[in-house]
Image (cartoon, rainbow, N blue to C red):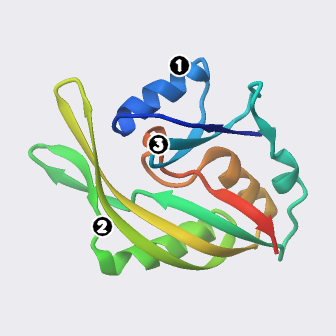
Amino acid sequence: MFLTRIDDVDGDDYRAHQHVMALFEKQRVLFQRKGHEILVLSKKPRPDSEDVSGITDSATEGQRFLFRLRVNPAVTRFLDGKNRRVGMPAEKIEPWLDALFAKHGFAADYVTRREGLRLSRKGENSISLLSVLAIGVLTVKDTGKFRAAVSNGIGHGKGLGFGLLNIFDVM
């Protein structure tokens, strides 16, 4: 896996997605946006990429990592004759995160910051996604599930900058 930092990206999340897809020749990637900067996790390297596969390849049960994760906590509701994802109520977000982390092979001590709605336009359609940032320390419980979570992302909205489990330092 390779991590690439891209600077000076303007526009909404959908425009950022288009920019990333063009740069990475439409390969499936995960990305996380912070202002005008984007971190991209890809399976194929680019000239300015850093190989980060060693971090998770060597992960062991009980190992701890600092992490950052932007998620779209949503539930499916039948609205206007269609199934639609809608933002989760604030009191349900942390239990949802705990269950999501357990499903993906780790437990975590973390804090969250509700960032609000992120709005994008795709043609005539508006896309609104609830954004919550989780930052903390995770403990690996199942190495296989953990590696898959880092490689494949977590939760909804991965194509619009959600779900990248950004691992920092080993603790």
Dot 3 lies on which element?
loop
Give coordinates of residue 136: x percent, y percent: 62, 75
* Whole-number angstrom distance, CA of label 1 to CA of label 3: 17 Å
Q: Relative to the observer, which residue lies in front, 85 or 7?
A: 7
Count residues near mark 2 (Cα–Cα under 10 Å), then give few for <14, some for 14-19, many for 20+: some
Q: Quadrant of residue 14?
A: top left
Mark linked to residue 166? none
| Quadrant location, the C terminus | bottom right
Mark 2 lies on a secondary structure that is: loop
Q: Secondary structure at mark 1?
A: helix
Q: Which residue is denoted by mark 1 in the rendering?
A: 22
Which amino acid, mark 1? Ala
Give the amino acid type for the residue marked by disc 2 in the picture.
Met
The residue labelled by disc 3 is 36
Identify the mark nearer the N-term, 1 or 2. Answer: 1
* Residue at (36% x, 69% y) in the render: 114
Which corner quadrant of the image does residue 56 belong to? bottom right
Which residue lies under the disc numbered 2? Answer: 88
Looking at the image, the residue that sits furthest to the front is 8
Residue 19 left/right relative to 127: right
Q: Are marks 1 and 3 in contact (CB under 8 Å)?
A: no
Marks 3 and 2, how far apart in space? 27 Å
* Sequence order check, earlier mark of 3 and 2: 3
